[in-house]
């Protein structure tokens, strides 16, 4: 199949944010499963690992002092304190993705999304809204929550909802498959954004301009040749 698009100049970070229970972690996992042009950004965090989480795969679990050292050395693209714990994106995640020619997918909070937008203005940011009603029971059903951490998550969720308007795109995560379809549609549209294909667009347009110049010359020449042939000088 021929590609309709032009190759993009460079890859970009794709940020997914949204309140707890919006299902963004599952959506990110499904998205990564579907596409090979994406790489997951493994964050560093000071929070304890949950059952089933793997160090270096889900998160890099660090002592607070180690996290702070990384941050103070400027090794984090962004960082934020969420629920009393530190979370951050190692800058090398973005460098690695760029070197591989893949987009870096970040599952981060709204503070982090703001920082990424400031640091990398061509980042694509998507806010996932939880479906109305059901998400609260989803949140409560999480085994890891105690009443006080649940309250904290609810307060953070309310704050995060207020930031939805800052994002490029907003999706309601009613159905995982449809949500991921939409994210893919966004990625596909971004591939054709004029600002992302500038280099190739210049080259392509130059070639077309040359073709036009040749066609113009060919369109004019036969007429001139005819005039010469008849000796008509009027
Ligand atoms: P959890 O502890 O439930 O895995 O994550 C709590 C929140 O921290 C989620 O909103 C998650 O997206 C966010 N988070 C995870 N990694 C990062 C990161 O590297 N930076 C920022 N700013 N937030 C993160």
Image (tube, rainbow, N blue to C red):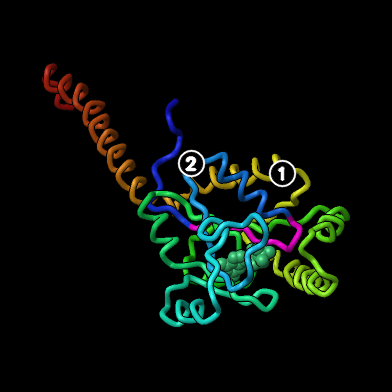
- Is 147 colored magenta in this rendering? no
x, y (%) of residue 99?
35, 54
* The N terminus sits in image quarter: top left
Quadrant for residue 223, please give it: top left
Residue nearest the observer in this picture, 170 or 35: 35
**Dot 2 crowding, Cα within 10 Å, few <14, some 14–19, many 20+:** few
- Kindly identify the residue that appears in the image at 61 percent across and 57 percent down: 53
**Spatial CA span between label 1 and label 2:** 19 Å
- Element under disc 1: helix
Say which residue appears at 76% left-offset and 43% top-offset: 175
Q: Is residue 37 visible?
A: yes
Count of numbered circles in the view = 2
Percent position of residue 147, x then y = 85, 71
Above or below, 229 against 13 in this view is above
Q: Compared with residue 78, is residue 18 higher up or lower down, i.e. above or below?
A: above
- Residue 196 versus residue 90 in the image, above or below: above
Chain-order first, disc 1 or disc 2: 2
Seen in the picture, residue 122 relative to 190 is either above or below; the reply is below
Q: Which residue is mark 2?
A: 36
Mark 1 lies on residue: 176
Q: Residue at x 45, y 34 (%)?
A: 4
Where does ligand 1 appear, by image quarter?
Answer: bottom right
Q: Quadrant of the C terminus?
A: top left
Q: Is residue 202 left or right of residue 69?
A: left
The quarter of the displayed image where residue 206 is located: top left
The segment highlighted magenta reads 13-22
Q: Where residue 34 sits: x, y (%)?
A: 57, 39
Q: Is residue 113 visible to us here?
A: no
At x 46%, y 81%, the residue is 69
Location of residue 189 in the rendering, given as x and y in whole percent from the top left corner: 54, 45
Tell which residue pokes out farthest to the front in this image. Answer: 51
User: Is residue 20 located in the magenta-colored stretch of the structure?
Assistant: yes
């Amino acid at each position: 199949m021929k590609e309709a698009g032009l190759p993009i100049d460079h890859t970009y970070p794709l940020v997914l944010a949204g309140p707890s229970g919006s299902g963004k972690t599952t959506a990110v996992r499904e998205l990564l499963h579907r596409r090979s042009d994406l790489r997951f950004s493994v964050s560093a965090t000071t929070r304890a690992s949950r059952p089933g989480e793997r160090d270096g795969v889900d998160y890099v679990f660090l002592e607070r002092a180690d996290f702070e050292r990384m941050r103070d050395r400027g090794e984090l693209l962004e960082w934020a304190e969420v629920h009393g714990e530190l979370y951050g994106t190692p800058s090398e995640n973005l460098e690695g993705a760029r070197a591989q020619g893949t987009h870096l997918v970040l599952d981060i909070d709204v503070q982090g999304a703001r920082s990424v937008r400031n640091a990398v203005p061509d980042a694509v940011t998507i806010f996932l809204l939880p479906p109305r009603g059901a998400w609260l029971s989803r949140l409560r059903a999480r085994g890891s929550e105690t009443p006080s951490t649940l309250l904290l998550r609810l307060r953070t969720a309310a704050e995060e909802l207020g930031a939805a308007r800052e994002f490029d795109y907003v999706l309601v995560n009613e159905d995982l498959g449809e949500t991921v379809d939409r994210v893919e549609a966004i990625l596909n549209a971004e591939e054709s954004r004029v600002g992302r294909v500038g280099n190739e667009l210049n080259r392509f347009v130059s070639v077309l301009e040359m073709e036009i110049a040749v066609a113009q010359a060919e369109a004019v020449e036969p007429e001139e040749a005819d005039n010469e042939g008849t000796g008509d000088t009027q």
